[in-house]
Amino acid sequence: MSHEKFGNESELRQAVICELDPGPLPQKAQAKLDGVYASLGSIPQDRPTAESAAASERPRPTRLSDAEAAAHGKPTGGRVVRRGVLMVAAAVTVTLLGGAAFAATTLLQMQPGDAPFFDSGKNLPIYGSLQEGVSSLSADVGQTVEVDGVKVTLDSVSSDRNIVNLFFTLEQEGGFDLTEQASYKGSQESEWDRLQRLSPRFTCALSSNGESIGSDSVYLLDAYREDGKVKVMQRIVPEATLPDQVDVELEGWATWKPYEEGDEPFTFDFGLDLGTVAQPRELGSQDLTFATSEGEKTMGIERFTASELGCVMAVRNDEIETIEESGRPIYNVAEGSITPSMLKVTDDQGNVLTPVGAGDGTGVNPAGAYVVELAGLSPDATSVTFTPMMHAADWESMTDEQRAAINEQNERTVDVSQIGTKLETSEYGGYELTGWDVVDGTVSISLEPYGWQAPFGGATGMRPTQQPTPLYEEWYDEETGEKYWGYHTAVGYQKHDYKTGETLLITSYYAASDEELRGLTEYEYQASFGGYREESDASQTLSF
């Protein structure tokens, strides 16, 4: 197997960004993206060459589909955009149903109520832990717009001062034909995967008393089909703690029709009255300075708040931007700074807090604040300790041969059919394998974390040691007549339990059969033994 090892975090962040795009898009999808980008004038159109299209004979499963990577602001050339700002496709023929949209002056109060999204049991089980909080803090909305024949209803909102959960219903006369939601012609990805692609994408603007308090991403968590309708759950993780009154404006883009010039987004507007919602436990905005073996390192906490719906840490981004000759921005961690991923966070009840993607978001804004959700904080915790986890190896001074030797020592394999197996990822932690299932061309692997998780690679990047059957595709450039071709293996997702930190890896394969996938039980992953050093003497403890 081949894994790259990187000497610093900025290299890793760039690698993650690049890894999101496994190859060229199909012609229809590329045309749709080009239309959106051209209308917004924000991202240069980089077309793949015939050589690059043919180069990837063994593409890795990725954490994002191509379209989703672009939708979450993945840089494709000379400029980084705000995560979640650019979406694939937009809406036309938008009709408000049942009267005008909610004015922002219509305030929704959170009260105990039902959580219908969870009633059918069709949601991903890993999100079952959200039901209790949603039931205790909920408000019905019932606002509907019709977008090109599809009715989109914002059924309800569940919010505290940390998190906003949104619940939608999509309905179309005669039901939905998911054939058009296939990634490629002839691909067989699962219904669940296609429903993620069907679900509308949103951006969000938050304000209070006429003052902006942030523009945040809206993350897609889950979607399922029931009685011909599609139920969707999405999540906003604001950078700022929400005040008593908040105006929320959602701009949505439809994914079920091709983009056309002049298309406009559809909107939902509502207000939140959070005056009766408890204030979260918080550590307060402050700079922490760690006296590490590499000198003083500072991290600026903008907020660390824990509430019924989640635990969120927002950290100032002190990275330095430089622009390459090509126009591509490069971000490097400042010499005197430390990032959240290089800290072990524990509470005074003995729990190691597990970072999970904010809202399960995979979009990255390298220039924006770090926004992290943390799982595992005890409700009885009175303090939190931050311990630096410094790089133990000087990768920059090593030869290629030395790096390769360390990488080889960290190569690991695991039989995913052996439930209960421990997957050690470093001296400081790992995962326990708690589930493996193959249904509808999709492999689902459940991992329960223990200890501290190294920030990149590890068990969450595991893949079969043998290549599953890929999907072969050919297409032509209409302008040049050139023929392109490529192989496509799968699309992958990571989902998290926001209370326990349990991770669910979902990989939907384009061509491999269930029988084939059940026979591929040996997986490989890269550990990080010898890669990090815990510096307990430099730790800092803050009290709520």
Image (tube, rainbow, N blue to C red):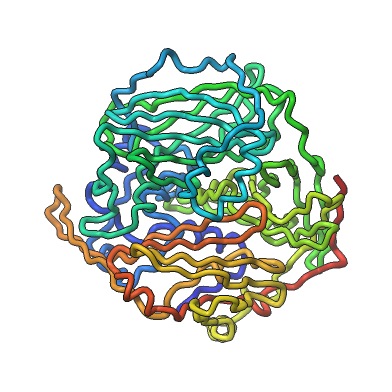
Is 278 rendered above or below residue 125?
above
Q: Which quadrant of the figure has residue 93?
A: top left
Q: Nearer the viewer, residue 72 or 149?
A: 149
How far from the left and from the top, in percent, is residue 411? 54, 82
Q: Quadrant of residue 87?
A: top left
Looking at the rendered image, the quarter that the N terminus falls into is bottom left
Q: Is residue 82 visible?
A: no
Relative to 16, 94 lies left or right: left
Q: Is residue 82 above or below residue 395?
A: above
* Front-lying residue, 270 or 18: 270
Q: Where in the figure is residue 77, as x and y percent of width and height?
A: 40, 50
Which of the 4 image quarters holds residue 165?
top right
Q: Count every numbered label the image shows and give the total.
A: 0
Q: Residue at x 17, y 57 (%)?
A: 475
- Residue 44: horizontal and vertical position, in percent? 36, 44
Residue at the outermost left position: 481
Against 501, residue 114 (above or below) is above
**Residue 266 rendering spot, x and y as whole percentages:** 40, 26
From the viewer's side, name the closer residue of 97 and 291: 97
Q: Front-most of 266 and 285? A: 266
Q: Residue at x 80, y 41 (%)?
A: 281
Q: Residue at x 14, y 48 (%)?
A: 478
* Residue at point 81%, 68% (across, down): 535
The C terminus sits in image quarter? top right
Does residue 63 appear to the left or right of 263 in the view shown? right
Left or right, 131 with reference to 388: left
- The answer to whether any part of residue 278 appears in the image is yes
